[in-house]
Structures are given as C-alpha cells and as structure tokens.
Image (cartoon, rainbow, N blue to C red):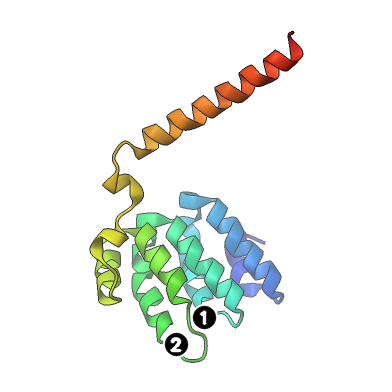
Amino acid sequence: MPVGQMLNNESEPQMRQTAAMSLGAMWSYASPALPQLIQSLQDESEVVRNESVATLGRLGKAADSAVPHLINGLDNAARPLSEEFVRGSLQQIHTESALQALENLGVDQTAGQKYETRHPNASQQTRQSSQNRFESRRSTRLRRVIP
C-alpha cells in the first residue's frame, strides 16, 4: 500500500504516524501525497495530526495549498492542531499566504523568515564547519593509527 494511502487507511495510530514521518523524510517527493496529508490533519490521534503538520512544513512552498487547512485546524474544537507545530510549519512553508497567516497569529514577520534568508551565507558556513569537523576527526584517527 502506498505511504500516502496508509496515512489515511491504516487502523493503528502508530502506523499512520509512521506513514506521516516517512512522507516527511521524503521531503519534496512527498508532494503527491499532499491531499492525504491535509486529510490527516483531522485524524483522531494527536500524534498523527502533529506529525502531518510537521511533514507539511518539510514540503516547504509545495504545501502552500495546505495553509488554510492549518489555520482552520487551530479552531477545530474536536481535533485541534498544535499552535506550536502550525507556527513551525508556516515558517517552513514560507510563502506569502503562510507569512500572512503567521502575522495574523501574532508572530513577528522576521520570525517567519528562514535562517538562510536572514543569513545568506549560513549554508556555506554550515558546510564549511561540517567539513572542518570531519577533517579534524579524520586527522585524530590517523594519528592514533599511524604513530
């Protein structure tokens, strides 16, 4: 059974949560499952709803059509979405409608900006830092092996 279908058709909440997590790990490849993710925002299990909200955030701009569903989910008395999760996802979706929704929720516009937007060299700095740590560990291991 495809993961998107499993998200809405599986009887066990843990399996639905795993399906949502799997879609989140697929990032942009999960876009075809967007309708199933939106539907799962009304799941009976809170962990499934939260994981689906987080997965929509990981889809980024591709999840723009889910923004109204995220906002409406905050007002769902029977199965509400976590405001913390919704805010995080809206920040990751980072489209005009998502930023407007954040503003309506009382979040400062700069809080809705991705780290890379505020710090254009962040990705390069992160890669360089990672490379430096790798080289450092490598030379330490070589010193242990080669006296």
Residue furthest to the front? 147
Quarter of image, res 46:
bottom right
If the image is split into quadrants, where does the N terminus sit? bottom right
If the image is split into quadrants, where does the C terminus sit? top right
Residue drawn 73% across and 16% down?
A: 144
- Tell me residue 53's x, y (percent): 48, 68
Q: Is residue 44 above or below residue 23?
A: below
Direction from residue 60 to residue 2 in the image, left or right: right
Q: Is residue 120 above or below residue 80?
A: above
Direction from residue 45 to residue 81 in the image, left or right: left
Residue drawn 54% across and 28% down?
A: 133
Labels 1 & 2 near each other (Cβ < 8 A): yes
Direction from residue 99 to residue 17 in the image, left or right: right
Residue drawn 33% across and 52% down?
A: 114
Q: Residue flagged by tag 1: what amino acid is it?
A: Gln
Camera-side residue of 120 and 97:
120
Structural crowding at the residue carrying mark 2, measured as other residues with C-alpha within 10 Å and reported as few (<14), some (14–19) or many (≥20): few
Q: Is residue 30 above or below residue 79?
A: above
- Tell me residue 138's x, y (percent): 63, 20
Q: Which residue lies under the disc numbered 2?
A: 76
Checking the image for residue 42, the label placed there is: 1
Q: Residue flagged by tag 2: what amino acid is it?
A: Asn
Cα distance between the residues tagged 1 and 2 = 9 Å
Camera-side residue of 54 and 27:
54
Camera-side residue of 25 and 109:
109
- Tell me residue 116's x, y (percent): 33, 45
Residue drawn 30% across and 66% down?
A: 98
Structural crowding at the residue carrying mark 1, measured as other residues with C-alpha within 10 Å and reported as few (<14), some (14–19) or many (≥20): many
